[in-house]
Image (tube, rainbow, N blue to C red):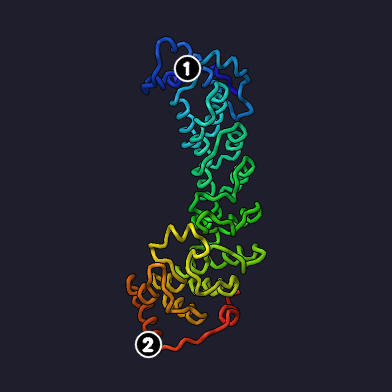
Amino acid sequence: MVRASTTYKSPAFVAALLSPLLLGAPLSLISLTHFVRSRAIIMDINICQSVEDLPAMPSAQLRDLWPPPTDWEVHDAEQALRFGDTTRAAASFLELLQRGTPVHKLQDCLHAAVKLQADELVHQMLSAGVPFNMLIIKTAIQQKALPILSLLKRYGWDINQEEAWCIPPWLSFALKTNPDIELLDWFLGNGVDPDKACQIGTTPLSTAAANASLDVIRKVFSSCPSPTSLRGHLLHFAVRRSDAEADAVVLLILNSVQPHINARMWEDCPLAYECFKLTGLGTALHETAKAGSVAVAEILLRHGADISIQDSCGRTAREVAELYDNQPVLDLLRDVEKGHLPVIRVAHDEAAARYR
């Protein structure tokens, strides 16, 4: 390992030593001596090949030698991570800790390390007490950084905690932004509860019903001991889909969860009902009337959807389809109202057997 003492007189060393001054870093004449000595030791640290090579120096000695770190020094460590220089960042992090930097000031450094997926450095930061926040958790989920997710859980992350009072727990975010089977397996293997609701009653399964693929929804259902007791108004969320799997997802939910086909949205959650009743809370058929497909509307009608039920604003499904200008569903509901299109009822198992 090359020691810094062999390079102290080189032009490159002098330029690196004085670079913060040339960039306008704020330093007084009184602290200039501290600055030069500290930059020399920083250079000594930065040429080490790994964290294990760092020269040992007691924290008390460092605090006597250097003044407290400035914000630009913390920013310098963060920038090293942004450019992928983990060795320099690790050295800067160790120095900042030894000089008594409050760990909450290093949170941006932790976020940068998570974005870089620098697992070892993330571990060091978490073990030193650097706090993590929602942004850091979301970044790890978006990048499918499974080792880092495991570290976050080890250091206190509750994966079943709601993201906010009106946003379900973290599996919901994973299913919405990165609905990947491997990521789902990690959550399922680490004690996630897909049926854990936020304060307004939505669950990660609500998000899955609205966004995830049929295979992902099947996998989540298979982890639930009793699908028929699932919360979250899954049918209401599923009928909003407009993708190619919408019909299959709706049929799977009708067959597996067997929800009350004419239940109004949030009628079992007083808080959510009071929050959203002015928007028009109705049955799954009302939701389909807003933006759903004719095929889904036909499925609901075949399973017993009642076209005469009014939502919380006093509108039937046909009136909602007219309000939202959903012409195909509007035409279907008009025909049913007039009796021009008889609805043939089917059993759950008959309709959904091929989607199991």
Looking at the rendered structure, the kind of residue marked 2 is Lys
Please give the name of the residue rendered at 52% of the width and 41% of the height, measured from the top-left corner: 133
Q: Which residue in the protein does label 2 denote?
A: 338
Which is more N-terminal, label 1 or label 2?
Answer: 1
Q: Which residue in the protein does label 1 denote?
A: 10
* The N terminus: image quadrant: top right
Between 138 and 257, the one nearer to me in the picture: 257
Between 128 and 25, the one nearer to me in the picture: 128
Percent of width and height locating residue 8: 50, 15
SS type, badge 2: helix
SS type, badge 1: loop
Between 101 and 291, the one nearer to me in the picture: 291
Please give the name of the residue rendered at 59% of the width and 40% of the height, measured from the top-left corner: 119
Percent of width and height locating residue 63: 55, 16
Between 113 and 340, the one nearer to me in the picture: 340
Looking at the rendered structure, the kind of residue marked 1 is Ser
Which of labels 2 and 1 is toward the front?
A: 2
